[in-house]
Amino acid sequence: MSPRLRTALSAVLVTLSCLLAPFGALAAWAAYGLTDTRGYVSAMAPLATDPAVRDAVADTVGDGVAREAGMNPAFLRDAVRSFTATRAYRTAWDAGNTAAHTAVMKALRGDRADVRADVRSDGHGDGGYGDGGPVTVDLAAVTAPLKRQLTADHVPFAERLPVEHTRVALLPSDDLAALRKGYRVLDVAGFWLPLAAVVFGVAGIAVAACRRRAVAATALGTALGGAFLGLAVAVGRRLTLADLPDAARRPAAGAVYDALTASLRTASWLLLALGLTVAATTWLTHPGSPVVRRLRGRRPPPAPAPPAEPTRVRA
């Protein structure tokens, strides 16, 4: 293969690798970060103490209870806000996120056996995660650990707290088929896109006529992809908050968005730092770089050769 053809093929492979790097990181985050219940709950746990989230919970729950009971909403909001500072609230927060995430993931994965077991265990008919109904979560999964925590803390009348099986809709049934297809695509892309980016990058460097230049180009492209990924996360945050009709909910929504995309932002910084580091190392170690030439110029001159002895001429 001629050097020109090798250079062209290397450029194509390196370009594909650099384009796939940010999309691979995004797909891997969506397929493995958002779908892991334990990781999701761990990411959401600190938000239980976030002031904006606590205010949003107090306003939502207080207004909802006030409408049902016909009570003063301001009083109920203050009561709920006080409750959000307790350990029991943090337990309920984690239990609620666990139950909601588990319900959504069961629906997206189509775990029909687990769904039927859940439906039989709570005594309800179909309508939990069934194919014909919306995705719902049983509030008993939240109130049961809350009751246990209150009882352990010796809160008066905690044992009388009712644990009722009341289902709350999370996803409408009309969107479930499209969401399942999207989940399957992400599940495949989350594994193959990062792998393809690595394979294309290694292949592009291997076939290059000048591998040093190929390494530098791959590193700079990876850094550019990391910067693009970070910019996409920032733009997505702005667009997400701008679409909220209630401006008062934007601080809480921003805190949730930041918690969910923390690992994605870390991945963008890693791509940027790794790419710039490799590119700088490649440039600094090049034989024609100013650093190498300066180091060569500082080498001590070679020692002079000893003077040759005079040749004696015999008479």
Image (cartoon, helix red, strand yellow):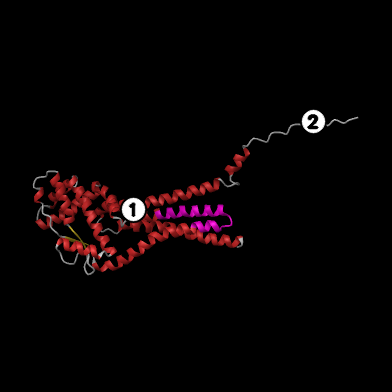
**Please, is residue 9 above or below residue 80 in the view?**
below
Q: Residues within 10 Å of mark 1 (few under 14, many from 20)?
A: many
Please state the total of marks drawn on the protein image: 2
**Residue 249 locus on image (x, y percent):** 25, 54
**Residue 98 locus on image (x, y percent):** 24, 54
Dividing the picture into quarters, in which one does residue 294 lie? top right
**Please, is residue 160 above or below residue 104 in the view?**
above
Residue type at mark 1 is: Thr
Alpha carbon distance from label 1 to label 2 = 79 Å
Residue 228 magenta-highlighted: yes
Question: Which residue is at the front of the view, 72 or 21?
Answer: 21
Q: Main secondary structure of the magenta part?
A: helix
Dividing the picture into quarters, in which one does residue 305 lie? top right
**Disc on res. 261:** 1
Q: Residues within 10 Å of mark 2 (few under 14, many from 20)?
A: few
Question: Which residue is at the front of the view, 112 or 169?
Answer: 112
User: Where's the C terminus, which quadrant?
Assistant: top right
**Residue 63 locus on image (x, y percent):** 15, 55
Can see residue 56?
no
Return the residue found at the far right.
315
Can see residue 90?
yes
Residue type at mark 2 is: Glu
Q: Which residues are magenta?
A: 201-229
Question: Which residue is at the front of the view, 122 or 289?
Answer: 122
Task: Residue under label 2, please give it.
Answer: 309
